[in-house]
Amino acid sequence: MEYVLENEHVRLECMEQAGQMKHFIDKDRNVELLYQGDQGWSGRNPSLFPIVGNTWTKDYKIDGKTYAMKNHGLIRYADLKGKQERDAILFTFDSNEDTKAQYPFDFHYEMRYTLEQKTCKIHYSITNTGVRTMPFTFGLHPAFRIPQKPGEVFEDYSFVFEKEEHAKQMMIDRQPHELKDVTFKEWKLSYEEIYQALTIIYQDLQSKYLTVCYKGEPRIRFHFDGFPYLAIWTHEKKSDFICIEPWYGHADFEPGHDDFYTREGTMCLEPGETFETEYSYEAL
């Protein structure tokens, strides 16, 4: 089934596979903003739950019992139940016997898409429907088509942050990983810098948004307020996309964190409690 939201400025199409966005067309400029999963990486914009990345050993322990999930958890591999509303698209997913064999908790997962002028807003809610404390973390992995037009060059794009940043960069290309003090207002896109870092991961950013610019011309504004980490990634095989990833947690970068409850970034929901968050991006 096709799930569509459209106004005079933009058109959004979504699909049941992982509840992902399929297209986001800036109708004013006749440009597709989203990567189509057709180059180095086959993904598009999965959501990461109940784990970001994976553990060092690819498995983990809950109350002394060992479990394992694929990279980035469960939702990215699931077909969600879609509902087309007049002014929103809603996707839902509930735990089942297959998910509980990998992650032994009951949950209800929702993601809701809405449009406001040229902005796409995505709201998430996760409810613990079980009877015991549920540990989890959460993140997003949207991939944007960069460059956007023929003749443009990846390295002519940049991220301009809302504020001058004095943050920490997680140096995951070494063990043990280190936190490096970094200061910047603008970051120019660079394949080589991403490859060297494996993934650029910032923590403690003060900005609530960044603006993707081409030679100083604003193209996309990406809002990530409330997320403790922001990652930047593209595939090691040069491809025309960049991922801007707000996270609440991260993968293990060294051994020794196999207890799921104590991993950095783990949050806990008591029975009946709901976690909510959102992000948005705007065509400029």
Image (cartoon, helix red, strand yellow):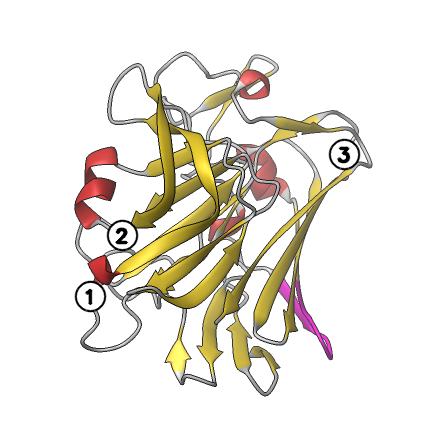
| Residue 130 pos. (x, y %) | 76, 34
Dot 2: within a 10 Å radius of its alpha carbon, few (fewer than 14), some, or many (20 or more) residues? many
Looking at the rendered structure, the secondary structure element under dot 1 is: loop
Extent of the magenta region = 81-90
Looking at the picture, which amino acid does disc 3 mark?
A: Gly
Q: Are marks 2 and 1 in contact (CB under 8 Å)?
A: no
| Residue at mark 3 | 130
| Residue at mark 1 | 153
Looking at the rendered structure, the secondary structure element under dot 3 is: loop
From this viewpoint, is residue 143 visible?
yes
| Residue 30 pos. (x, y %) | 40, 85
Picture residue at 46% right of the left edge, 30% below the top: 68
| Residue 33 pos. (x, y %) | 41, 70
Per the model, the C-alpha gap separating discs 3 and 2 is 44 Å
Picture residue at 41% right of the left edge, 68% below the top: 219
User: Of residues 77 and 43, which is closer to you in this image?
Assistant: 43
Dot 3: within a 10 Å radius of its alpha carbon, few (fewer than 14), some, or many (20 or more) residues? some
| Residue at mark 2 | 189
Looking at the picture, which amino acid does disc 2 mark?
A: Leu
Picture residue at 40% right of the left edge, 24% below the top: 252
Dot 1: within a 10 Å radius of its alpha carbon, few (fewer than 14), some, or many (20 or more) residues? some
Residue 110 falls in image quadrant: bottom right
Asked if residue 54 lies left or right of residue 274, the reply is left
Looking at the rendered structure, the secondary structure element under dot 2 is: loop
Residue 92 falls in image quadrant: bottom right
Q: Earlier in the sequence, mark 3 or mark 2?
A: 3
On residue 9, the disc is none
The vertical placement of 237 against 217, above or below, is above
